[in-house]
Image (cartoon, grey):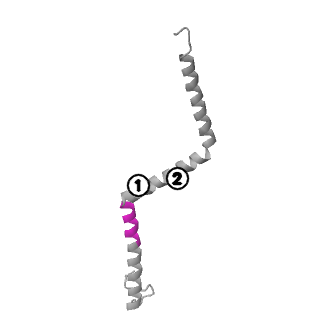
């Protein structure tokens, strides 16, 4: 099909050509904006960091009881080791 053909055999009018040109420019502009966004490494890295921070915050909020229990358990183990090592009497 000839680009200047309307599809039914008649040539396009100036208005039809202008409309097609406008549509093509708009599509090309959208493509250029999408490519520019992909090429903007700083913005993409910033967005990734923000998303990761949000996921970590949400995860920590959801699991804080388990995290608190793990922390208390770790403190109990450290305290037990310190008490055991500092007790009077025989050392290994």
Q: Picture quarter containing residue 70?
A: top right
In front of the other: label 2 or label 1?
Answer: 2
Q: Up-down: is 73 above or below 1? A: above
Residue at image x 41%, y 85%? 19
Picture residue at 53% right of the left edge, 50% below the top: 55
83, above or below 29, in the image: above
What quarter of the picture does the N terminus occupy?
Answer: bottom left
Q: Secondary structure at mark 2?
A: helix
Would you name the residue on which mark 2 appears?
54
Mark found first going from the N terminus, 2 or 1: 1
Per the picture, the main secondary structure of the magenta-coloured stretch is helix
Which range of residues does the magenta coloring cover? 30-39
Tell me which residue sits at (56%, 9%) in the image.
Answer: 89
| Residue with the mark numbered 1 | 45
Q: Nearer the viewer, residue 12 or 76?
A: 76
Residue 16 - label:
none
Q: Residue furthest top?
A: 90
Q: CA distance from mark 2 to mark 1?
A: 14 Å
Depth order, front residue of 45/81:
81
Q: Residue sitting at 39 percent across and 69 percent down? A: 33
Estimate the x, y position of residue 68 in percent, counting from the top left. 60, 38
**What is the count of numbered marks?**
2
- Residue 91 percent across, percent down from the top left: 52, 10
Residue 10 magenta-drawn?
A: no
């Amino acid at each position: 099909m000839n680009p200047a053909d309307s599809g039914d055999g008649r040539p396009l009018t100036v208005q039809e050509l202008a409309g097609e040109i406008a549509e093509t420019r708009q599509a090309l502009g959208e493509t250029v904006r999408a490519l520019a966004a992909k090429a903007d490494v700083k913005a993409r890295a910033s967005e990734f960091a923000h998303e990761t921070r949000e996921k970590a915050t949400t995860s920590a909020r959801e699991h804080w009881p388990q995290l608190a229990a793990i922390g208390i358990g770790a403190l109990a183990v450290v305290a037990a080791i310190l008490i055991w090592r500092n007790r009077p009497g025989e050392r290994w």
